[in-house]
Image (tube, rainbow, N blue to C red):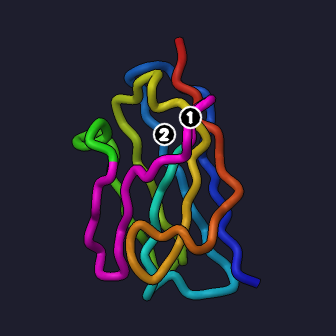
Amino acid sequence: QLQLVESGGGLVQPGGSLRLSCAASGFTLENYAIGWFRQAPGKEREGVLCISGRFITTYYEDSVKGRFTISRDNAKNTVYLQMNSLKPEDTGVYYCSTGRLCPGGVHWGQGTQVTVSS
């Protein structure tokens, strides 16, 4: 059974860092794109960034450029989202999603909560 499981969320102070993980099971991530999305309270889910099967990164949210990076470890069947210099407006539930091409959007994880607050 194809499954994506996010982890690594939590409460962090502004300016802090978190690394989210998206672990896949039931299929091999190697040939798929993985996108990270987020949904802030009261807002629509939005794409943040994505990494293709060829390790090309696409940003969908300008506000995270220079702060968020995405990487993948195919040997571990896992994709990571490194988030630095976090801001309160980064608060939300973060989801990973896979598909043949970016931004993903075919299969989804259950999400992990990120709260940036002092």
- Using the rendered view, name the quadrant where residue 114 is placed: top right
Residue bounds of the magenta highlight: 39-60
* Residue 43 tag number: 1
Q: How many marks?
A: 2
Which residue is most to the top?
Answer: 118
Task: Please give the name of the residue rendered at 57% of the width and 47% of the height, measured from the top-left corner.
Answer: 94
Task: Please give the name of the residue rendered at 26% of the width and 42% of the height, measured from the top-left corner.
Answer: 62
Q: Is residue 117 above or below residue 39?
A: above
As helix, strand or loop, the secondary structure at mark 1 comes to: loop
Q: Amino acid at mark 1?
A: Lys
* Residue 18 tag number: 2
- Residue 3, image x and y in percent? 70, 74
Q: Amino acid at mark 2?
A: Leu
- Residue 50, image x and y in percent? 38, 63
Task: Please give the name of the residue rendered at 55% of the width and 57% of the height, measured from the top-left corner.
Answer: 21
78 or 98: nearer the viewer: 98
Mark 1 against mark 2, which lies toward the viewer? 1
